Amino acid sequence: MTSPQLLTLPLTAATAVQLLLPLLSLIYSVAVHIFLSSFNERSLFRFHHWNPIMIRAVLFCFGATFSSFTSSASRGHDDDDYDGSVQSNAAILSTQLIYIIATIIIATLSTRLILQTRQIEINGPPPPVSANLQGKVIFITGANSGIGLETTRLLYLQYNATVILACRSRARAIEAIQSINPSWKECRYTNNNNSSSSGAIHLGNRMHFLPLDLTSIQSIQTAAKIFLEEMKMPLHVLINNAGVMLNERMETVDGLEMTMAANHLGHFLLTNLLLPKLRETAMNDKHPTKVMTVSSSLYTNAVRPSSRSSNNKNETTKWNNEPGIDLLDLQCQNKPYRLFVQYAQSKLANILFARELGRREKLLHGGLVQSHVLHPGLVRTNVTRNMPWYLYYPNLVFSLFMMMLQKSPQCGAYTTVYCAVTDEESDDSCYFVNSKKQPLDELALSDAEGRALWKLSCRLMSLPLEKES
């Protein structure tokens, strides 16, 4: 094989690399931007979100231009022009070296940009490692799987916090605890009469399981009673993390719609029952405690009927919708149940609740308890298990592709942990996304609807309404 033929092979490979990797970097950046915009995590047309795409487009154009020169050079070194002289060999080797170096630079930049897209735009920044929560007690709902499990893992292992895993399944809670600390040993709390309590278990003195079913008022009351009267701990952070997405309308044992009960009403009751302990801890420590509510960017999809000509939810007449919380039918009793619509309603309820909680605590109790609300990101968890088959199976089939666009549960815990370990104050016009404050949409900023939702939730949960002075 002559020297020009030896040159052709590496130049062909260089051309492929110079085109393919910058193109993949560009496509990935565009796909991430469209994906995040479609789930309302960012604005599709806001200019600064297009800056990373423009940088990758410039790199692709440079790679395409350089590859065209590479192809021209490869065709130029044909056998007719090659005379076998030392000068010809030196020129060919020099050309090869230049193209190989340029290809390595383009490939390195493209790979780095692909990883940067994943790290910055999808995963988000990890929480600070310098914080230490030793001696702090953090209560987490839904802590045995998904984001809740990873939040527990980080807070327990990295920040030395004492963590209460409040969830329904004792077996899954024990499995979760053992995955965090394999040296776990089980024992039970006992009351003053040395009789076994209602099932609370603990690991050493820093990880504890507490039975809690957010769809049962009695279970919530029992869990709060065990924590307050038997465990007798301070409480520094309450993380309202648990959530469900159901394909069809179901009711709890108390006759409440399941999605709204699990995502909002159960957390509303639990928070109110634990607020006295949170305030007491804040006064003892002379430092505010926190209630953190995990919402979703999908709250922007919440709509309510703008007119109700009939109360028959089975009618086939069209409903005219407008953005907002449906306080007249929070539980889909008089309108058709829609999976994503009701989920969005519950996530909007999370935000209105968190804002109203913060307002009331400042007004009535001097801000002893701070209220934070956050969006963990588009996380790949088992929440999709209740989707209808025509959504569940495509999600399963394209799982590899979706994994490239979604956060892992560990990265989904970053924003929750950030809010727990830092002293950054909340803002009632923003929520936290990727550990940064992001303005809320107008439909979540109504103080009047927040107060109305609070009153309605008190009535549904049979709680007394604390009057404002």
Image (cartoon, rainbow, N blue to C red):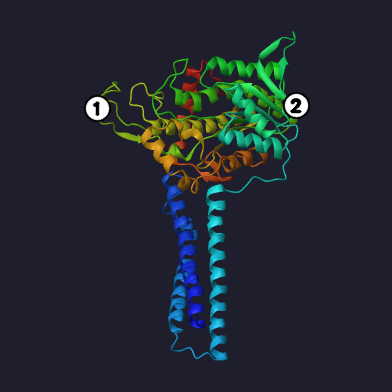
> Label 2, label 1: how many angstroms apart (C-alpha)?
57 Å
| Crowdedness near tag 2: few (<14), some (14–19) or many (≥20) residues, C-alpha within 10 Å | few
Vertical arrangement, residue 49 with respect to residue 386, above or below: below
Residue nearer the viewer, 37 or 18: 18
Name the residue furthest top.
Answer: 193
Task: Tell me what residue is drawn at x 33 percent, y 22 percent.
Answer: 334
Q: Which residue is mark 2?
A: 205
Vertical arrangement, residue 399 with respect to residue 334, above or below: below
Q: Position of residue 188 (x, y in %)?
A: 71, 17
Residue nearer the viewer, 17 or 24: 17
Q: Position of residue 10 (x, y in %)?
A: 51, 73
Q: Position of residue 389 (x, y in %)?
A: 38, 33
Q: Which residue is mark 1?
A: 316
Amino acid type shown at disc 2? Asn
Task: Tell me what residue is drawn at x 67 percent, y 26 percent.
Answer: 279
Mark 2 or 1: the one toward you: 2
Residue nearer the viewer, 101 or 25: 101
Residue nearer the viewer, 407 or 256: 407
Give the structural element (helix, strand or loop) at label 2: loop
In this picture, residue 53 sits left or right of residue 147:
left
Residue 146 in view, yes or no: yes
Give the structural element (helix, strand or loop) at label 1: loop
Task: Answer with the quarter of the image where residue 100 lies.
Answer: bottom right
Q: Position of residue 99 (x, y in %)?
A: 53, 76
Q: Earlier in the sequence, mark 2 or mark 1?
A: 2
In this picture, residue 90 sits left or right of residue 54:
right
Amino acid type shown at disc 1? Thr
Task: Answer with the quarter of the image where residue 232 lies.
Answer: top right
Quadrant for the C terminus in the image? top right
Task: Tell me what residue is drawn at x 48 percent, y 33 percent.
Answer: 383
Vertical arrangement, residue 67 with respect to residue 338, above or below: below
Contact check, label 2 and label 1, Cβ < 8 Å: no
